[in-house]
Amino acid sequence: MNEGSNEDLITVSLFSEVLASEQLMRGRLSRALPKGMELSHFVMLNYLSWQNKERSPAELARTFNLTKGALTNTLSKLEKYGYIHIRPDWDDARKKLVLISNAGDRARDESVLAITPVLEDVMSKLNKNKLRDGLRFLRELREALD
C-alpha cells in the first residue's frame, strides 16, 4: 500500500476536519433556528440583509454555488413567507431582482438571536488568540477554492 507523503496526509486531514466541522455546525445551527426556518433560508436572508440591495437570482446562484432549481426552491419559500420581494428588472423584463423585506429582516434577526448561544458555546471552548489566525486561514482557503 502506498502511504503518500506527510504533506498529503496533512492536507487530507485538514479537509476532513473542515468537512466534519461543517456538518456538526450545520446540525447544531439547524436545531437552534426558529421553527420553520431552514439553514439555507437563514443563510440567504443573512446575505441579503448584509448586501442591503437588490440581487438577481443569477448573482445569488453564483454566490452560493447553487443550481437554478435549488435557488428557485429557496427563493419561492422565502417569498411565500413574505421574507423577500421578487420583482421584474425594469431594464430587462426577462430578469428578476430579489430584495429582503422588513419581515425577512425580522426573521433574520430572530434567527441570529436563536443561534447566538450555540455560537457562543462553541467559541467559549476555543483559544481566543487563535481565532483571528483561523479566520484568516479559512478565508484564504475559501478564496483558493473559488
Image: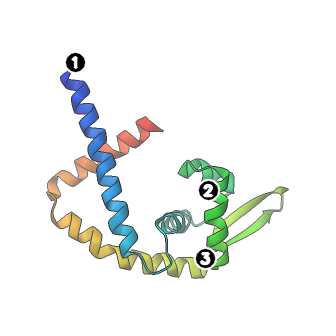
| Disc 2 residue crowd, few under 14, some 14–19, many 20+, Cα 10 Å | few
Of labels 2 and 3, the one closer to you: 2
Query: Which tag, 3 or 1, sits closer to the chain's start?
Result: 1
Q: What element carries label 2?
A: helix
Q: Is residue 146 left or right of residue 86?
A: left
Residue that extends furthest to the top in the rendered view of this protein: 2
Rendered position, 34 above or below 51? below
* Residue beneath the point at 41% across and 75% down: 33
Q: Position of residue 16 (x, y in %)?
A: 29, 42
> Marks 1 and 2: which is nearer the front?
1
Assess disc 3: are there few (<14), some (14-19) or many (≥20) residues with their C-alpha within 10 Å of its C-alpha.
Answer: many
* Disc 1 to disc 2: CB gap under 8 Å: no
Residue plotted at (67% across, 68% down):
76
Q: What residue type is labelled 1?
A: Met
Q: The residue under label 2 is which amino acid type?
A: Ala
- Residue at 36%, 68% in the rendered image: 29
Kindly state the secondary structure of the residue where label 3 is placed: loop
**Does residue 19 appear left or right of residue 83 in this picture?**
left
Give the percent coordinates (x, y) of residue 13. 24, 37
Q: Name the residue under label 1.
A: 1
Of residues 100 and 81, the one drawn nearer to the viewer in this rendering: 81
* Mark nearer the N terminus (2 vs 3): 2
Q: Which mark is residue 55?
A: none
Residue 134 at what x, y percent from top left?
25, 48
Residue topped by disc 3: 83
Q: Is residue 50 left or right of residue 13?
A: right
Q: Name above or below for residue 143 compared with residue 32.
A: above
Question: Which residue position holds label 2?
Answer: 70
Residue depicted at 46% across the width and 81% down the height:
35
Whole-angstrom CA distance, mark 3 to mark 1, is 54 Å
